[in-house]
Image (spheres, rainbow, N blue to C red):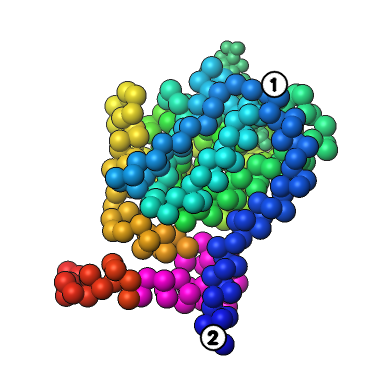
């Protein structure tokens, strides 16, 4: 009976993403059609099989990597691809050409500036970013240059935020007569607490590396010279301390943390037992036992 209960808990946490996805699929159809009209840029995914690190690039440099409508659809597609990457350990989200992302493309925003379409777009992006955060991969937002509006929200949909010395995160929504709608406010409160979140949102405050570290929004400042791929190499280096070992173990770690973050204590404990059952007596566990390690 206990086995059946714990299996159903695992199924629940693992199916969370699919449930959110399918609920939104029907209602999102009409907004998909509208979004795909606003083209430009791309969202690219490169999976490095050897390291288990994927690099997700927001690529629209002519508009400071703003999200066009078609890029919102592509982002969802890329997240879908990552959900089934069983050999993966981590994903780095960054922007092309030394900028992170300047939020939604203001041309698309103007064209759908009515409450109905706005709500549908918001629901669509909330769904995609929730699935990004729930991936069983360790996710890192690498902020070079500016992360504005929806770009700032995107950084909160990752487990960690790394910043180069020129990085800035700014929730500019208030200046646009808005509040975050891609789930950024809810996640920000959980990362920095409600006092800091209120200051950042109501003051549209610029978060530079020092301030970011002080309030716990930024996990690490990367001191690297500018140059294509340099910050990315530093981010991979930083990440390497957390992804040593086989992918199933790294993914199990992320799953127990997601359940701890999102479920009630009873449900999280149940899920933890179930995930534990997937690694206990597994190849990595048996190999470690055979080596008789000393954790000095
Ligand atoms: C729920 C989601 C809410 C949102 O995300 S609302 C959108 C919030 N973002 C914004 O308002 C960003 C507005 N843009 C800016 O503040 C500045 O362009 C920015 C990013 C600080 C860069 O400033 P500069 O370095 O001086 O460069 P610039 O202004 O000449 O920009 C270069 C080209 O990029 C364009 N751009 C930047 N952000 C954009 C956006 N979000 N949508 C559409 N186009 C955007 C900008 O118009 C300019 O294009 P062009 O060279 O004039 O053709």
- Please tell me which of labels 1 and 2 falls first in the chain: 2
> Would you name the residue on which mark 1 appears?
107
Q: CA distance from mark 1 to mark 2?
A: 54 Å
Q: Is residue 86 visible?
A: yes
Q: Main secondary structure of the magenta part?
A: helix
Give the mark count: 2
In the rendered image, which quarter contains the C terminus? Answer: bottom left
Report the residue at 35% width, 41% height from top: 48
User: Would you place residue 111 above or below residue 277 in this image?
Assistant: above
Provide residue 185's location: percent of width, then percent of height. 64, 47
Q: Residue at x 30, y 37 (%)?
A: 234
Residue at (75%, 24%) from the top-left corner?
Answer: 110
Q: Which residue is mark 2?
A: 2
Of residues 106 and 21, the one nearer the viewer is 21
Image quarter for ligand 1: top right
Q: Which residues are magenta?
A: 256-280
Compared with 186, 42 (above or below) is above
Element type at mark 2? helix
Vertical side of 115 occupied by 189: above or below: below
């Amino acid at each position: 009976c206990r086995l059946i209960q714990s299996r159903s808990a695992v199924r629940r946490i693992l199916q969370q993403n699919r449930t959110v996805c399918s609920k939104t699929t029907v209602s999102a159809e009409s907004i998909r059609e509208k979004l795909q009209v606003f083209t430009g840029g791309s969202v690219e995914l490169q999976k490095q099989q050897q390291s288990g690190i994927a690099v997700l690039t927001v690529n629209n440099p002519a508009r400071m990597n703003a999200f066009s409508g078609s890029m919102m659809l592509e982002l969802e597609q890329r997240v879908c691809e990552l959900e089934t990457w069983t050999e993966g350990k981590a994903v780095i989200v960054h922007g092309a050409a030394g900028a992170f992302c300047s939020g939604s493309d203001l041309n698309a925003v103007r064209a759908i500036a009515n409450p109905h379409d706005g709500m549908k777009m918001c629901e669509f992006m909330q769904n995609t970013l929730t699935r990004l955060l729930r991936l069983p991969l360790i996710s890192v937002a690498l902020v070079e240059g500016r992360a504005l509006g929806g770009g700032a929200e995107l950084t909160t949909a990752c487990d960690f935020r790394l910043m180069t010395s020129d990085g800035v995160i700014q929730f500019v929504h208030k200046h646009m007569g808005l509040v975050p709608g891609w789930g950024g406010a809810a996640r920000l409160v959980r990362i920095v607490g409600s006092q800091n979140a209120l200051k950042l949102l109501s003051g549209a405050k610029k978060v530079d590396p020092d301030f970011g570290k002080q309030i716990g929004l930024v996990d690490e400042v990367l001191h690297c010279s500018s140059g294509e791929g340099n910050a990315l190499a530093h981010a991979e280096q930083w990440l390497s301390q957390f992804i040593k070992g086989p992918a199933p173990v790294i993914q199990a770690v992320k799953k127990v943390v997601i359940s701890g973050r999102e479920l009630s204590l009873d449900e999280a404990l149940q899920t933890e037992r179930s995930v534990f059952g997937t690694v206990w007596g597994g190849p990595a566990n048996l190999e470690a036992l055979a080596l008789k390690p000393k954790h000095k």
